Amino acid sequence: MEPKSCSGDGNPSRNLHPSKPLMAANFLRCLSRIQQTATNSSVGSRSRRIRRAAYASMAYSAGHRRAWSWALLRKLRCRRVRPVILPRRPRIARPQVVIEIDRAEVLRKLVPGGTGMDYCRLLEETADYIRCLATQVRLMQTVTDSISS
Amino acid sequence: MSSRRARSRQSTSSSRITDEQINDLVSKLQAVLPEAHIRGAERVSAAKVLQETCNYIRSLHREVDDLSERLTELLATTEASSAQAAIIRSLLM
């Protein structure tokens, strides 16, 4: 499946991320698998698996194009039984001006990969991350509504 | 603001980050926040935008957690075939 490109503007009125169809397909596939295989596991572990599937489908649909999805993918893959070694992206040296912008520090911790980028990059990545997150939330809401109706 | 002075001081260095670039990025960020359509083109301070962004991201993370739990409960109590049907239905939406 060809991933849609993550352009800056997609549908500004709805704030949906352009890779929504891909995210939906990934997430629903994971859900299906969890539903089929998880009959013996606890509610807590199944909830964690679904949560993990949500972040994984976001990260996979954005792929390596975004620093936040790259960081998320690395974090997710490290937890697998057989870890896949991803090549390390070169860390961008933070210019002096960034250190003085303290209010961005909280944001850095919230956005995956936020600690390794300069202020401008952080702002860009945050906007894309938020759009993806919001799309994922809407997707999960739609699935929940579908199942409960 | 001292940070803006610091930025102009640093603008001659190789980073070349201009105030304009940063303002542009901040307004793009403001546009994805939930009340963007209410505010329209009204300029909000960068500090406020960052603060709201952090709050919004935290609330989105919480929503993902809550929806994951909700989905778990639903999938546990719903019969497999109707869950699959509902899942396929949402794909088609």
Image (spheres, coloured by chain):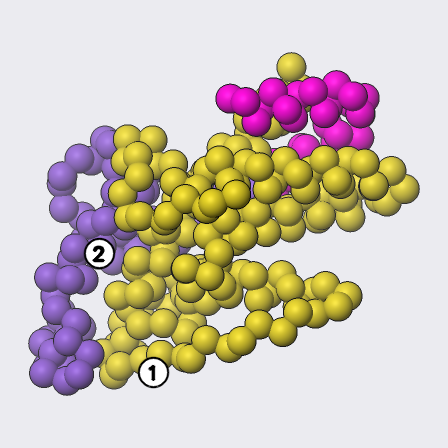
Chain colours: A yellow, B purple
Vertical order, A143 against B30 (above or below): above
Residue B18, picture quadrant:
bottom left
Residue A43, picture quadrant:
top right
Residue at (34%, 82%) from the top-left corner?
A: A93
At which x and y percent is residue A58? 52, 48
In this orientation, which residue lies closer to the viewer: B55 or B92? B92
Main secondary structure along the magenta-highlighted residues: helix
Q: What's the magenta region? A: B65-93
- The answer to whether B3 appears left or right of B63 in the picture is left
- According to the image, label 1 marks what residue? A93
The reply to whether residue A140 is visible in this rendering is yes
Q: Does the segment drawn in magenta span residue B86?
A: yes
At which x and y percent is residue A53? 64, 47
Residue at (78%, 48%) from the top-left corner?
A: A45
Residue at (60%, 20%) from the top-left corner?
A: B89
Q: Amino acid at mark 2?
A: Leu
Vertical order, A46 against A122 (above or below): above
- According to the image, label 2 marks what residue? B25
Checking the image for residue A75, the label placed there is none
As drawn, the residue found furthest toward the top would be: A149
Vertical order, B35 against B5 (above or below): above
Q: Does the segment drawn in magenta span residue A49?
A: no
SS for callout 2: helix
To which chain does the residue with label 2 belong?
B
SS for callout 1: loop
Task: Point out the image quarter for the C terminus of chain A.
Answer: top right
Q: Amino acid at mark 1?
A: Ala
Q: CA distance from mark 2 to mark 1?
A: 20 Å
In this orientation, which residue lies closer to the viewer: A81 or A96? A81
At which x and y percent is residue A134? 44, 40
